[in-house]
Image (cartoon, rainbow, N blue to C red):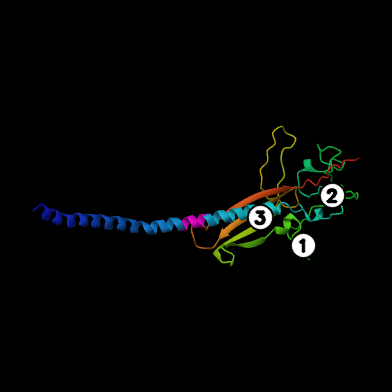
Amino acid sequence: MTQNLRAGFRPAIAMVELVFAISVIGIALMSVPNLLTISMKSGFVTLQQEAISEASAHISAVMTYAWDENDTNESFLPPILKVSNGDSELNDNGSGIRQGTPIESYRKFITSGGFTLDASTVLGQEAGESEPDDIDDFNGKTTKLVLIENAQSDYVDQNITMTTNVSYADDSANYNSNDITFTPFQSKSGTTNIKDISVTLTSGSGVKELDKKIVLRAFSCNIGSYELEKKRF
């Protein structure tokens, strides 16, 4: 009699376990769409971070180029270029150097050939040039970013573009004051002693996580170049 009761009780326990397992599976399946959505968003964030990393590397590379077209002549050290609309405190002090600069400094307005040069008024690549050779040659350049997945060059196309712009920025500041105040990245007409470099990331993918305007900025100054001191034996 006891054995019969146990035999009849076992299926009831199995049924409860089955119902419980089905419930757990159902809950798990209900969470799958959310997990997929989270995974996709994480992938978009990764793409965005890769794009920002590429923009940062690009802006660093741009800053390695000559400050101006008139600094690209390798027959002499790049001089400080004369500008048309810069702060007067940064002009030639009459000795071919800026106020506060040691006389022995190589950073001069006058080249080794005894002449001065003006900063370029046109921002952009010069006619006849196949490759950029100074910072403002990148002005207006637009590149489409492609994420390479494997050696077969398959890629994820999210329509992310990177646009570079270079402009002259206001270099005005109260240099004669103990507290110098300066507001960066203020555009100014004519030529000044600061070039503003901006790299803008945009996407037309239609994905909310990617459709953001991200701007990275840097600046480069008109300070000429220097020459390393040579040891004489």
In this rendering, which labeled residue sits more in front, label 3 or label 1?
3
* Residue at numbered disc 2: 77
Foreground of the two, 42 or 63? 42
Given contact means CB atoms under 8 Å apart, are the residues at marks 3 and 1 in contact? no
What secondary structure is marked by label 2? Answer: loop
Image quarter of residue 73: bottom right
Are there few (<14), some (14-19), or many (20+) residues within 10 Å of tag 2? many
Whole-Å distance between the Cαs marked 3 and 1?
21 Å
**Residue in the picture at 34% in, 59% down:** 29
Three-letter amino acid code at the position of disc 1? Glu
Can I make out residue 59 in this image? yes
* Residue at numbered disc 3: 58
Foreground of the two, 145 or 217? 145
Q: Is residue 169 found left or right of 113 in the rendered image?
A: left
Three-letter amino acid code at the position of disc 2? Leu
Three-letter amino acid code at the position of disc 3? His
Q: Which residues are magenta?
A: 40-45
Residue 121, given in percent of the width and then of the height, sits at 77, 56
Vertical arrangement, residue 35 with respect to residue 223, above or below: below
Given contact means CB atoms under 8 Å apart, are the residues at marks 2 and 3 in contact? no
Residue 100, given in percent of the width and then of the height, sits at 80, 36
Vertical arrangement, residue 106 with respect to residue 36, above or below: above
Residue 180, given in percent of the width and then of the height, sits at 70, 36
* Residue at numbered disc 1: 126
Q: Is residue 83 found left or right of 11 in the rendered image?
A: right
